[in-house]
Structures are given as structure tokens and as C-alpha cells.
Amino acid sequence: MNKKNRLQPYLITTLILLAALVLSFAVGSVFISPRTMIDVLFSAVRGEASALDPNGVYLKIITDLRIPHAVLLMLAGAALAGSGGAYQGLFRNPLADPYLIGVSSGAGLGAVAAMMIQWPYTTLGLMVVPAAAFAGGILTVLLVAQLARVGKTVPTTNLILAGVAASAFASALTSALMINSTGELRRALVWMMGGSTQTGWGPVWGILPYMVVGLCGLVIIGHPLNVLQFGDEQAQQLGIRVQRVRWYTIAIATLSTAAAVAYTGIIGFLGLVVPHIVRLVWGGDYRRLIPVSMLGGAGLLLLMDVIARSVIAPQEIPVGIITALLGGPFFLWILKRSKSQNYW
Amino acid sequence: MKSFITKICALLLLVVLLSSCAVPAGESGTSKISLVDGLERPVALEKPAARIVSLAPSITEILFAIGAGDQVVGRDSFSNYPEEALAIQDVGGSMGSYSYEMIASLEPDLVLAGEINTPEQVKSLEDLGLTVYYLSNPENLQALDEVLAAAGTLTGHEKEAGELAASLNERINAVLSAVAKAEAQPLVFYELDATDPAKPWTPGPGSYMDELIQAAGGRNVGSVLQSSWAEISIEELMVQNPDIILLGDSNYGITVEQVATRTGWENLTAVTEGNVFAFNDDLVSRPGPRMVDGLEELAKIIHPELYK
């Protein structure tokens, strides 16, 4: 591939992401015209009040609601799509998504369990639910890995089976908690469908450290994942320490997915579909697939969120509903259009 | 759990005490309102709120009932009563999430949240620089006074709130003394949802329906359940054999005729004797002043002999 073609996937996904960002800032249940928005932002940079926004409401909407929300979703979309791509490579399974070995059901259990208790209304009390989701996700994966381990190795089949069983168990516990609750039911349901719960910059700062580590960590495992596609033995002979790559991928994908899920709830389908779209369009080289999936995942989630916020405004639909509702047909369309017989 | 309830009660009492002593501070003409809300947050207003956003249907109903209806500039999607409320700007809430930007753009001086809202939602609104008051649901029917008093103080309608509370209490007492004369306490089954007629959803202990049915001189089939909302087995329903069935799901199109066609239901006393009634669920599920309407309706259905 020549240089121009090598850059093309990155350029296209970056353009989609930028367009999605602009849309995300521009669209909301309150209409702010582009002229007002530019004036408000430039006035804010100059440190004066805009004539078009005497009470500063628009500025507040843009800087305290729309921008941090977009950044949070961008990070979550990148983490989910990147982890999904990495898992598909690691498990050599087209059905793998970031939730495969239990991180989402564990996080769901943690979050819903934390919602059952009325925590004091303090900064710490408000952090309990995302913290419990994060911890629940990571603990579940640790447990699954422990159960699937055979000596020093961890066979992928064992991981998948242990993951499925643990997920079912955690989901059953979550449902039992929800059935037994009264007021928390709606809150739990919205969380499970990917409705973000907190606004403002707090959640962004909260997950940023994990995201930086997770996203960078995902980008650099492209090469070992490529080699892994030849099978464990071949990879071993080619100098890849298979078990180490496996543990590393699981750790880094779990970290970033759990962090994403902690504040945005469970957003389904994105982590499964985006890497497949990238693979269909640009091929399965993981050195490219993972970063391009991240860019695409971030852009796509933002676009889905714009739809979720605007179709029945001022009501907002949890974004997880939209990702599954539109993601499914969109993926089928891509699949149908692809010329290759077996792209996987 | 018990100590938790005691704490909440103590808190409510504190709220009332604070609200009652905070009001008459207007010596210098700047009467500042300061209360502690249901989340133990201190809430202060320079003057009674003039631009209010209500995030729950019960709160919208309370505001209109105490004469603060024209101060409401935004309401949640579920607020459909009174009819005037429908003309007010909708700020979302039907899918559990509100449009914060819509709320901010209304520039309210007070956002009234309820138990339908999460602490995260309160925090999000607070972060936008808005004054939020979390209005807890009343512990029981009698405790409606305290909720009305808080709403009255915040909106500058203390007098109307007090009058409303007094008239509601009068009506509650009228029902209580009327049903005290009743000879029997009919068994009532309140249907929340019977999509699966073999295990319909019904209110259990701790729900307003349970309390209201008992206050109206009936016994609630769901009293045997563990939680406030649960599915009850058709077998239990057949054994208890209720005298009256109330269709709280009639708002969703369930009719009296449909009940008789369900397997196992056709031989229930309530069905054979024609004591199945549609019931407006909003009257007993929204912790606002219309609960007293609900109580009166229930008493009339459960004890028609007393209301001839």
C-alpha cells in the first residue's frame, strides 16, 4: 500500500469524528444558532459577556453540558470499539465484543447494588455508583480469568465459557436486585441502556487516567495480535509470548471498558460492530484496525448520541437503545455490500 | 431498615421545624428562605421562587393545588394534570433523563426534584448553578401536610398550602370516620399490570395503594407480599378470593370485560358478582393532593353502602 492509501482510513475516520463533534456541539434540545454559538465562544475567550447571551445561559449549556458530554462519549466510544477490536483479534472470534468475558454484567451488578443504598448526598456519595460499576467490572473479569486459568496458561475457550457463565450469573443477581427494588428501578434500567447519569467535567476527569493508559495500551498491541492470527503455536515460534499478550490485552481492554461503563452505562453493539466495519472496509491488520476503530467508534457514538438527544427532544433516549437500533441494520447493510465472500 | 425509617422521619420532622421557623424572618424586608431538603442539603432562596421547574407529576400537581401554577415554567413529560400543565414547556424525563440544557435555558430560580429523581440528576442541575430542592414523598397520607408546607414556603404560598392541608385533613377524617362505621372490611385486589394473568403485579406493604385501601376500610390482597411492588401468584389470588378488583391499569386500556376472560379469574367472587372496576391509577400513585381524591373514590367503591 502506498503512503496515501495508508493514511486514508485515519483521515476518513478523523473527518467523521470532527464532523460528529461539530454536530454534537451544535445540536441539542435548545437551539443555539451557529452565529450565536461563535459569538458566545469568542466572547468567552476574550473574557467578556456576549451580547447575544446576556445571562450566560448559552455559554453554560455549551461549556458545562455539550462539550464535556461529547468528550465523555468520545472516550467511551473509542474505548469500546478499540477493546472490541482487540478482543476479536485475541479470541480469533468474530462475535467477541468488549463485554465478552463479563465486564459489563459485573459493572451492572456493581452499579445496581450501589443504587440500592441511599448514599449521603456528598461528592463521595455520588462517586459510589461509578466506583462500584468500575470495581464490579474488573472483579468479574479477574474472577473469570481465575476460573478459566489452567496452570500458567489461560485457554481462550475456557475464558469465553467462564465469561458467559459469570455474565449470566451476574445478570441474574442484577435482575433479582431490580425486581426487589422500588424507586431505583428506573435509574437502574436507564443505566443498563447507556443513559449517562452525570453531566459536567467530573466524569471526564474521573475516567481520563484510565482512558489514557487503556487507549494507548490498546494501540500498541496491533502487531502481536496480527501474529496471533496464525494460531498460538505459530505465534510462539515467531517469538510472541502468547500468554503474556493474552493477559496484557485482557487487562488493558478491561481497564478501559470498565472506565467507560462506569459513567456512561452499558452501551451495546458499538464494540462489536465498529471493528467489523473497519475490517470490511480496510482489512484486518490490527496495527491499523485498532486505532481506526477507536476513531470510528468515537465518531459513531457521538452521531448516535446526537440522534438520541434530538429525535424526541426535549426527551432524551438512552444512547444504548440507538446504537443497537441503528447499529444493527447499518452493519447488515455494510455486510451485504461487501464484495468479499469471507472477509474474516 | 427500621432505624433508617426513623432517621428519615426525624429528617422530615427537622425539615418541617426548620421550614416553620425560617418563614417569619422578614423583619428587614429581605425575607430569606432557607430549608433543608430531602437529601439533607441546605437550600436558600432570597425570595419565593418565581420561575419553577417541576421534575415530577406529583410536584406539578402540588404546585397547582397551592396556587403556584403560574410560577411553573417547566415540567417533566409525565406531568399531565391539571390540564393547564400541558401548556408548560416539557423538559423531558420520560426515559429517565431530562434535558438539562432545556432546564438551564428556562432560567429557573428553583428546580423542584422528587424521589423519582436520582442524586446524580440533582448534582447535574446544581453544577449548572441552579437552586434545586429535593422534595421527599410524604411518609404517609397524613404527612402530606409537611410536603405541602415546604412547597408553600418555597413558592410564597404558605397560606394556601396551609388551607389546602387543612381541607385535605378534613376530607381524610371524614372518610376515616365514615368507614369506621362499616361492618365488614372487603378484600381488595389492586391490579397494576396483568400482562401475565398468572402472576399479576400488585402493590404490597409500604405502597401508597396499600395504605389508602386500608384507610378506605378495605383489606389489600398484596399485604401478604414482601415488597412494595411485586408479582402475586394466581393461586394466592384464588385462595384469598378478593371481593373487589380494581384495575389500576385501566389507563392502559385494560377493561372490566377482559378480566373475566382470563384463566383462573372467571370464578373469583369479584368477577362473578360484578365487582371489577376501572380505577384512575394517577389518584393513588402520585404522592400529591389528589391522593385524597383517590381515598374518597376507594371508600365509595369499597363501601357503597355508606355513600348512598
Image (spheres, coloured by chain):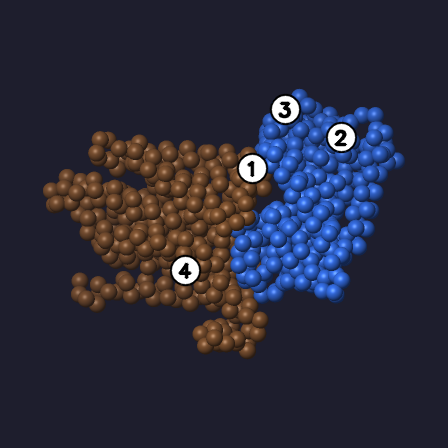
> What residue is pinned by disc 2?
B218
Mark 3 or 2, nearer chain start: 2
Residue shown at the point (27%, 62%) measured from the top left: A9
Q: Nearer the viewer, residue B93 or A113?
A: A113
Mark 2 or mark 1, whichever is nearer to me: 1
Which numbered disc, 4 or 1, marks the residue that appears first in the sequence? 4
Q: Amino acid at mark 3?
A: Glu
Is residue B262 in view from this perspective? yes
Position of the N terminus of chain A, as image quadrant, is bottom left
Q: Which residue is mark 4?
A: A71
The residue lying toward the viewer, choosing from A151 and A29, is A151
Instruction: Give the residue at x 70% y 62%.
Output: B47
The residue carrying mark 1 is: A181
Disc 2 marks a residue whose amino acid type is Gly
Q: What residue sits right under mark 3 in the picture?
A: B236
Amino acid type, callout 1:
Ser
Tell me the crowding category of disc 1: few under 14, some 14 to 19, or many 20 or more residues within 10 angstroms, Cα based.
some
Measure how far apart labels 3 and 1 are at the Cα level.
22 Å
Which residue is most to the right? B308
User: Residues under labels 2 and 4: Cα distance?
Assistant: 55 Å
- Chain identity of mark 3: B
